[in-house]
Image: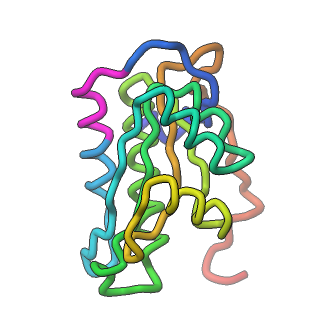
Amino acid sequence: MNEIFIRRSIRKFTNQTIEPEKIDKLLRAAMQAPSAANQQPWEFIVVQDKGRLAQVAKSSPYAQPVAGSAVTFVLLADESRLKVPSAWEQDMSAAAENLLLEAVHLRLGGVWFGVATADLVVENVRQYFDLPRNIRPFALISVGYPDGQDNQFVDRYQAERVHFEKW
């Protein structure tokens, strides 16, 4: 699966919109992720309106590329579905990575912005989307057709970090 090796964080996008069938494929890929006890806590908000994207970009000092994306997915976890409460971030991370890999497969670019890692950003997203208390913001993933950046292989393998049988 070459997509694993060539995926890069793409932060600059063309003005081209993404076809609805590709958005559907991205969401389907995210929801195919493994999850603890099959709890599948994910919920998604799909943001395509340029005014809303500009507003969402203000939720974090690092999220400026959201404004230039064709679509940004807001990844959320429904706490009422948690059978294994300590595993929600792992579940959501698997969904996020699936979405990013599908983006590469569709010849799109994408970038993951953490939300759950900063309380202020969580509250910004919570307020902007008027989320109920049981819905926990996790991440933003911006996607679009790459403009000047490419998904390309960069070897990150480090043999010295691999240990067999013991440290």
Q: Main secondary structure of the magenta part?
A: helix
Q: Which residues are magenta?
A: 18-26
Q: Note whether 56 is above or below 109 in the view shown.
A: below
- Residue under the point 37% across and 37% down: 102
**Image quarter hosting the N terminus:** top left
Residue sitting nearer the eye, 41 or 104: 41
Residue sitting nearer the eye, 109 or 132: 132
Which image quadrant is residue 41 in? bottom left
| Number of numbered discs visible in the structure rendering | 0
- Residue under the point 36% across and 26% down: 106
Q: How is the image coloured?
A: rainbow
Tell me residue 49's x, y (percent).
42, 29
Q: Note whether 12 is above or below 15 in the view shown.
A: below
- Residue under the point 61% across and 40% down: 57
Q: Give the residue at the far right of this rendering.
A: 160
Q: Is residue 21 magenta?
A: yes
Q: Note whether 133 is above or below 139 in the view shown.
A: below
Which image quadrant is residue 12 in? top right
Which image quadrant is residue 24 in? top left
Tell me residue 117's x, y (percent).
65, 66
**Image quarter hosting the C terminus:** bottom right
- Residue under the point 48% across and 19% down: 145
Tell me residue 135's x, y (percent).
39, 70
Tell me residue 52's x, y (percent).
48, 36
